[in-house]
Image (tube, rainbow, N blue to C red):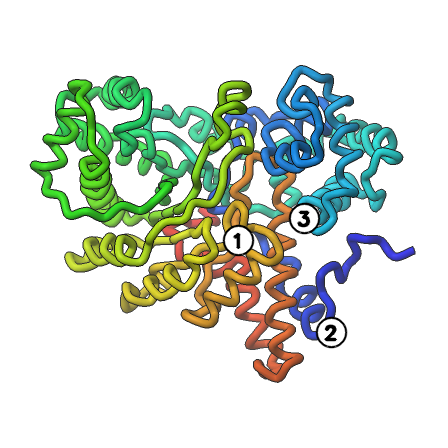
């Protein structure tokens, strides 16, 4: 019987098969945004069993398990690793239609070389096979990266991080992949969130700047950005529930920060003004450093108070936010562009209703000499599945230029998630192959194949200021 994950998985036409097998398949991976642990890479972590590498921390799987009514002790609780794995195995057949079904079997196929469909009946067989293979050093953290042909990894790092593990990775001549930090200063922006002043104190300590006002806060941020730059950082990132844009002078921002510093109540409008001002400052800073800026827009986090109290944040209780974006997005980009201080920018939408808003805004702020300076980013989080990826690429190609797209990223904490690049490439080839078959694109495989290779890898190498081979 033909394997479920076969060489033509997701490819339904001869055109799509040619594009994938002849052009996309062998391209390296440029994973410019993820949440892998630099410590685990530096220490070349080995995993004790399939639960540790596959289920721990995976809120996609956790949400599916909860939807099936599985007891929380088998998800984030104190059940044993095999018991947790058995519950996942029992659940997998019921995820058909969800990308988890595809991802699960892609990962089993690529890293554990099995075509067995995971279920309650096959749980023990798969458990034993995977755990036996995990004893082999070829499935350590570094070896998984190497075997996946990953050339660049961009982790996600707070400005207070000392980046010690990035330095160790850089010094390790056995690691051929570039593993670089990404500057994510979200906690310095969220002045109404609990712990803001504790964070400001920590930032002051690591930067050796005594933060007493807004000016010294910015000094501390700039010092940390310079430090990150020295260690190899060339990309920043922001996770924002909404993108604010309320005109705010430096003096106003300083007054608002002083109120927060003194424990006074901050109004909604003051929060928006402060965030706008500091985001403008950061955009200019990134431009001066030659960095690219990523804006991840639209998550509504930790919505279940009951479960937040029970298992804490970032455990699978987040949703898509709905808000007005067009005016603030264009205002923010224009605020930086009018003084020629807009960095290369990638904008990700968690809400697909914003796709055209983002795609049209990107077209307003391109710059001569740079291909696709302002990017509509790949399908993210709830959208990094078949429908979401195809929708993002279709909307981008309808409004802008798919050919300049910097492609996919894992955005994952799992070393097994590199199969998402394969999944994306198969869908990309299926999309473009469909255009050939419907007569919307010529059967010019060298031309279309080049575009496929560029989106898969080459565009990212040109876009980011990172020497892959150095």
371 displayed left or right of 381: left
Between the residue at mark 3 and the residue at mark 2, the CA separation in whole angstroms equals: 26 Å
- The location of residue 184, given as percent across then percent down, is 36, 36
Element marked by disc 2: helix
Between the residue at mark 2 and the residue at mark 1, the CA separation in whole angstroms equals: 24 Å
110 is higher (above) or lower (below) than 316: below
What residue is at 71 percent from the left and 68 percent from the top? 17
Between the residue at mark 3 and the residue at mark 1, the CA separation in whole angstroms equals: 19 Å
Residue nearest the observer in this picture, 204 or 149: 204
Residue nearest the observer in this picture, 324 or 163: 324
Q: Residues within 10 Å of mark 2 (few under 14, many from 20)?
A: some
Judge whether residue 387 can be spotted in this image.
yes
What residue is at 54 percent from the left and 19 percent from the top? 310
The circle on residue 372 is: none
Q: Residues within 10 Å of mark 1 (few under 14, many from 20)?
A: many
- The location of residue 391, given as percent across then percent down, is 54, 62
What residue is at 24 percent from the left and 23 percent from the top? 207
Task: Mark 2 or mark 1: name the one nearer the start of the chain.
Answer: 2
136 is higher (above) or lower (below) than 294: above
In which quarter of the view is residue 255 placed?
top left
Element marked by disc 3: loop
Q: Residues within 10 Å of mark 3 (few under 14, many from 20)?
A: few
Task: Mark 3 or mark 2: name the one nearer the start of the chain.
Answer: 2
Task: Mark 3 or mark 1: name the one nearer the start of the chain.
Answer: 3
Residue furthest top in the image: 78
**Closer to us: mark 3 or mark 2?**
3
- In this figure, which residue is indicated by the disc labeled 2? 14
- The location of residue 215, given as percent across then percent down, is 12, 30
- In this figure, which residue is indicated by the disc labeled 1? 408
The circle on residue 98 is: 3
Judge whether residue 47 can be spotted in this image.
no
What residue is at 77 percent from the left and 22 percent from the top? 82
């Amino acid at each position: 019987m033909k394997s479920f994950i076969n060489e033509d998985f997701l490819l339904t036409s001869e055109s799509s098969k040619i594009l994938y097998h002849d052009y996309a398949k062998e391209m390296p991976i440029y994973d410019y945004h993820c949440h892998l642990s630099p410590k685990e890479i530096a220490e070349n972590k080995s995993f004790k069993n399939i639960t540790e590498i596959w289920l721990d921390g995976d809120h996609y799987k956790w949400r599916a398990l909860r939807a099936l009514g599985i007891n929380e002790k088998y998800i984030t609780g104190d059940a044993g690793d095999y018991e947790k794995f058995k519950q996942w195995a029992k659940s997998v057949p019921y995820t058909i239609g969800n990308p988890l079904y595809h991802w699960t079997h892609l990962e089993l196929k690529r890293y554990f070389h099995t075509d067995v469909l995971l279920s309650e009946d096959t749980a023990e067989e798969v458990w034993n096979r995977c755990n036996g293979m995990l004893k082999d050093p070829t499935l350590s953290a570094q070896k998984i990266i190497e075997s996946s042909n990953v050339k660049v990894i961009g982790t996600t790092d707070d400005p207070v991080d000392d980046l010690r593990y990035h330095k160790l990775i850089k010094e390790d001549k056995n690691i051929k992949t570039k593993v670089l930090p990404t500057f994510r200063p979200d906690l310095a922006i969220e002045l109404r969130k609990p712990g803001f002043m504790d964070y400001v104190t920590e930032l002051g300590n690591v930067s050796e700047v005594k933060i007493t006002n807004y000016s010294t806060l910015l000094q501390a941020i700039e010092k940390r950005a310079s430090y990150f730059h020295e260690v190899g950082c060339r990309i920043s990132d922001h996770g924002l529930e909404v993108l604010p844009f309320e005109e705010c002078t430096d003096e106003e921002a300083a007054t608002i920060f002083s109120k927060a510093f003194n424990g006074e109540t901050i109004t909604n409008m003051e929060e928006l003004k402060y965030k706008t001002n500091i985001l403008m400052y950061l955009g200019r800073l990134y431009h001066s450093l030659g960095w690219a800026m990523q804006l991840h827009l639209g998550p509504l986090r930790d919505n279940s108070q009951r479960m937040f109290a029970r298992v804490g944040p970032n455990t699978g209780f987040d949703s898509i936010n709905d808000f007005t974006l067009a005016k603030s997005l264009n205002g923010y980009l224009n605020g930086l562009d009018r003084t020629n201080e807009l960095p290369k920018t990638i904008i990700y939408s968690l809400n697909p209703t914003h796709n055209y808003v983002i795609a049209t805004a990107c077209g307003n702020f391109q710059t001569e000499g740079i291909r696709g300076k302002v990017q509509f980013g790949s399908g993210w989080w709830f959208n990094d599945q078949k429908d979401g990826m195809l929708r993002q690429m279709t909307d981008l190609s309808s409004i802008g230029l798919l050919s300049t797209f910097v492609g996919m990223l894992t955005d994952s904490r799992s070393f097994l998630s590199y199969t998402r690049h394969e999944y994306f490439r198969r869908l990309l080839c299926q999309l473009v192959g469909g255009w050939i078959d419907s007569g919307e694109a010529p059967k010019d495989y060298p031309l279309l194949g080049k575009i496929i290779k560029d989106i898969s890898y080459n565009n990212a190498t040109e876009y980011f200021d990172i020497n892959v081979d150095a």
